[in-house]
Amino acid sequence: MKSIDNLQDLTKKIFEVTVKIQTLYPELYFLLNETPLFMSQNEKYITPKDLKQYLTSIRMQLFTFEKEMAK
């Protein structure tokens, strides 16, 4: 199984989730502007760890939103 540790893979995954949200749930997409990308205070640049945390965050938002829509 391929690891998603590099920036290109993480960026692609974030893009895919974002497009899914934008296409299927525009009301949730609007709220993504309020989803911060947390960065370590010790880092000058966005790291793979930062992107992984952001990806997890938007995936959880999507999961929760889909779960609520199913009710």
Image (spheres, rainbow, N blue to C red):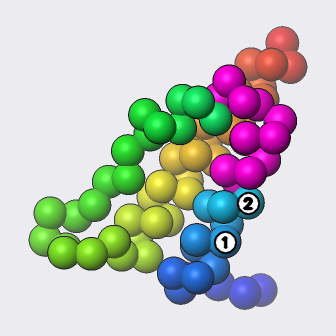
Q: Is residue 33 magenta?
A: no
- Vertical side of 48 occupied by 50: above or below: above
Q: Is residue 17 visible?
A: yes
Q: Residues within 10 Å of mark 1 (few under 14, many from 20)?
A: few
Q: CA distance from mark 1 to mark 2?
A: 6 Å
Q: Residue furthest top?
A: 71
Q: Along the line of sight, which residue is nearer the eye, 70 or 16?
A: 16
Determine which residue is flagged by label 2: 16
User: In the rendered image, which quarter is residue 9 located in?
Assistant: bottom right
Going by the numbered disc 2, the residue's amino acid type is Glu
Q: Where residue 47 sits in the image (x, y, percent)?
A: 36, 75
Q: Quadrant of the C terminus?
A: top right
Give the position of the N terminus as an image quadrant.
Answer: bottom right
Crowding near pointer 2: few (<14 within 10 Å), some, many (20+)?
A: few
The segment highlighted magenta reads 17-28
SS category of the residue bearing label 2: helix
The residue located at (28%, 61%) in the rendering is: 39
Spot occupied by residue 67 in the image (x, y as percentages of width and height): 77, 26
Question: Which secondary structure is most common in the magenta stretch?
Answer: helix
Asked if residue 64 can be seen in this view, the reply is no
Residue designated by label 1:
12
For residue 18, above or below residue 66: below
66 left or right of 10 in image: right
Is 27 magenta? The answer is yes
Q: Is residue 42 left or right of residue 64?
A: left
Query: Hey, which quadrant is residue 21 in on the image?
Result: top right
Of 19 and 52, which appears nearest the observer? 19
- Residue 37 sits above or below residue 29 on the image: below
**Which amino acid is tagged 1?**
Lys
What residue is rendered at 74% in x and 19% in y?
68
Q: Mark 1 touching mark 2, by CB under 8 A?
A: yes
